Amino acid sequence: MDYIALGQRIKVKRKDLRMTQEDLAEKVGISSSFMGHIERGSRVLSVDTLRRLCVVLDVSADDLLGLKYDHIVSRLTDEDLELAQTLLQHTLDIVKSQNHKIT
């Protein structure tokens, strides 16, 4: 179990909802200190705490645990990954060229 990645996904979702660690901790029923540890991946959370986080953040456990993405990535071929990298590079090139035109 990658607790650091779990903590990062929790943090991203919390920030998307414009919540502080203290807000989230209060709604989940844990201390803000423990919430900080969870987001840093330095403490293990219980299944019950994970469930309450899912409810408060309105997200599935699969999303927080990264199961959807792990399942998809594990099925990608080297050719798929190479194509994705090429598309990402082209997208970045377009964004960079558009930023130069704006300024």
Image (cartoon, grey):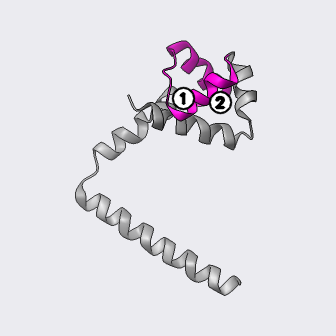
Label 1, secondary structure: give it: loop
Q: Amino acid at mark 1?
A: Ser
- Indicate whether 26 appears above or below 7: above
Residue 27 place in picture, x, y as percent: 73, 21
Q: Which residue is mark 2?
A: 57
Residue 42 place in picture, x, y as percent: 50, 28
The prevailing secondary structure element of the residues shown in magenta is helix
User: In the rendered image, which quarter contains the N terminus?
Assistant: top left
Q: Is residue 67 left or right of residue 81?
A: right
Q: Amino acid at mark 2?
A: Leu
Q: Which residue is mark 1?
A: 60
Rendered residue at 34%/46% (across/down): 73
Q: Is residue 84 left or right of residue 29?
A: left
Residue 67 place in picture, x, y as percent: 41, 34
Rendered residue at 44%/67% (across/down): 88
* Count of marks, rendered view: 2
Query: Does the magenta-highlighted stretch encompass residue 47?
Result: yes
User: In the rendered image, which quarter contains the C terminus?
Assistant: bottom right
Rendered residue at 68%/43% (across/down): 16
Residue 79: quadrant of the picture: bottom left
